[in-house]
Image: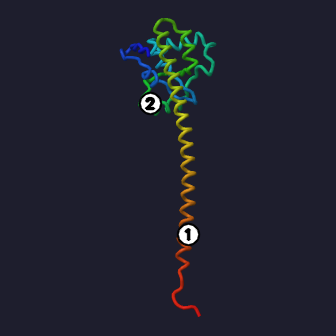
């Protein structure tokens, strides 16, 4: 298997698929990435990324990108365990997998191409993991059903044995002579 090239972020942090995966969040039932995280990965300022998107807004319908609500930001803070957002004045945008793919046509340069490949691979890996988890959940459900069925059988056998033991205790032979 070909070894992935590691790319550095603007903070000189190595970018691996796992690094990208940690920046994918589940919001409104969709896997998304924050505009600020994408800007860091693409090594552009968040405002410049958003300007490029706004100049090409027709390429980003609601299923590609949407703005978070204040409540969603609070939930996200709780989810990722940070106490402050960094003081942004605007509600952040988030990009779905389709939106991230569209960013490659809006942002230019080798860095944009490399990061887009990394991000798309991370989305695919997460999709595969979710499919695996769904398969495991289905198998666990089947095992639970089988275990319940076997438990019901054991209860029935136990009930029959108890009844037979009770009947045996009641049928003691009388002591003495019959007249």
- Which callout, 2 or 1, points to the residue nearer the camera? 1
Q: Which of 151 and 34 is in front in this view?
A: 151
Q: Name the residue under label 1.
A: 164
Relative vertical location of residue 45 with respect to residue 123 in this rendering, above or below: above
Q: Quadrant of the C terminus?
A: bottom right
Identify which residue is drawn at 61% across, 16% down: 60
Seen as rendered, the residue at the extreme top is: 109
The kind of secondary structure element at disc 1 is: helix
Identify which residue is drawn at 53% across, 62% down: 158
**Residue 88 appears anywhere in the view:** yes
Q: Which of 22 and 160 is in front in this view?
A: 160
Q: Quadrant of the N terminus?
A: top left
Q: Which of 149 and 30 is in front in this view?
A: 149
Mark 2 to mark 1 CA distance (whole Å): 61 Å
Do the numbered discs 2 and 1 sit on residues whose CB atoms are within 8 Å? no
- Expressed as whole percent of the image width and height from the top left, the position of residue 45 reads 46, 13
Seen as rendered, the residue at the extreme bottom is: 179
Identify which residue is drawn at 50% across, 23% down: 125
Relative vertical location of residue 96 with respect to residue 168 in this rendering, above or below: above
Graded by Cα atoms within 10 Å as few (under 14), some (14 to 19) or many (20 or more), the crowding at tag 1 reads: few
Q: In which quarter of the image is residue 166?
A: bottom right
The kind of secondary structure element at disc 2 is: helix
- Expressed as whole percent of the image width and height from the top left, the position of residue 72 reads 53, 30
Graded by Cα atoms within 10 Å as few (under 14), some (14 to 19) or many (20 or more), the crowding at tag 2 reads: few
Identify which residue is drawn at 57% across, 91% down: 178
- Expressed as whole percent of the image width and height from the top left, the position of residue 143 reads 54, 44
- Expressed as whole percent of the image width and height from the top left, the position of residue 177 reads 54, 91
Q: Name the residue under label 2.
A: 80
Closer to the chain start, of discs 2 and 1, is: 2
């Amino acid at each position: 298997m070909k070894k992935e090239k590691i790319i550095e972020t603007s903070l000189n942090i190595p970018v691996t698929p796992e690094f990208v995966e940690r920046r994918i969040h589940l919001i409104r039932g969709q896997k998304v990435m924050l505009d600020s995280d994408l800007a860091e990965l693409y090594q552009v300022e968040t405002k410049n990324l958003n300007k490029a998107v706004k100049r090409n807004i027709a390429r980003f319908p609601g299923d590609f990108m949407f703005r978070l609500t204040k409540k969603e930001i609070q939930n996200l803070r709780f989810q990722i365990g940070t106490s402050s957002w960094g003081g942004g004045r605007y509600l952040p945008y988030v990009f779905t997998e389709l939106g991230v793919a569209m960013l490659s046509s809006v942002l230019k340069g080798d860095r944009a191409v490399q990061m887009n490949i990394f991000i798309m691979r991370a989305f695919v890996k997460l999709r595969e993991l979710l499919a695996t988890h769904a398969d495991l959940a289905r198998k666990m459900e089947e095992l639970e059903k089988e275990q319940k069925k076997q438990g019901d059988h054991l209860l029935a056998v136990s009930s029959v044995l108890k009844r037979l033991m009770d009947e045996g205790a009641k049928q003691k032979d009388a002591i003495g002579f019959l007249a």
